[in-house]
Image (cartoon, helix red, strand yellow):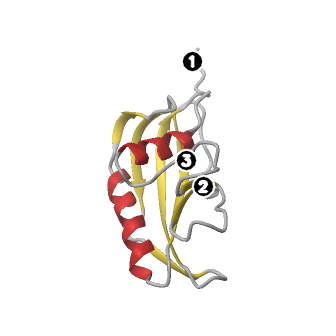
Amino acid sequence: MPDLLDGVARYLMARGHVTYDPTGLAGDCFIESAPSTPDACVVLTVYDDGAETDSQIGYDDVPVQVKGRGGTDPRVSRARVQAIRDELLGLGETLLPDGTYLLLCLGNAAVAGLGVDDNRRHEHVANLKLRIRSATTHRV
């Protein structure tokens, strides 16, 4: 069964942006939450943006947040999230490694700073919308 976040993580790993271990025990890219280490990491999360979907149009727009954490230098996490945003934004007509068919990746205009976590590590985010072929399309 396709898993969009796993597919995105594997896609980013193939392009040298992250090291992804699907078990979540190693690497620096995680799904939905980050462990306390390593300091520099990326977390991919699907979030609810309040938009409604229509099962008749053949695609879903899935909001995905790319959150980067770095050290005490804010440029580290900002640059990494920017590079991932640049890699994905505008990407279309791509079969992701998990089997999800990406029609188009849309996104916001800028990477945003979140400040620092409890360990004074800077965090940045980019919010993207991945338009994927819908598995719920009903044809008559």
CA–CA distance in space, label 1 to label 3: 21 Å
Looking at the rendered structure, the kind of residue marked 1 is: Arg
- Mark 3 vs mark 2: in front: 2
Q: Relative to 81, does residue 105 appear above or below in the rendering?
A: above
CA–CA distance in space, label 2 to label 1: 30 Å
Looking at the rendered structure, the kind of residue marked 3 is: Val
Q: Are marks 1 and 3 in contact (CB under 8 Å)?
A: no
Question: Residue at image x 48%, y 44%?
Answer: 8
Q: Residue 1's x, y, as percent?
A: 62, 27
CA–CA distance in space, label 3 to label 2: 10 Å
User: Which mark, by number, is residue 139?
Assistant: 1
Binning the other alpha carbons within 10 Å of mark 1 as few (below 14), some (14 to 19) or many (20 upward) gives few
Q: Considering only order in the chain, which callout, 1 or 2, is on the residue closer to the N terminus?
A: 2
SS under mark 3:
strand
SS under mark 1:
loop
User: Which mark, by number, is residue 36?
Assistant: none
Q: Residue 2's x, y, as percent?
A: 58, 31
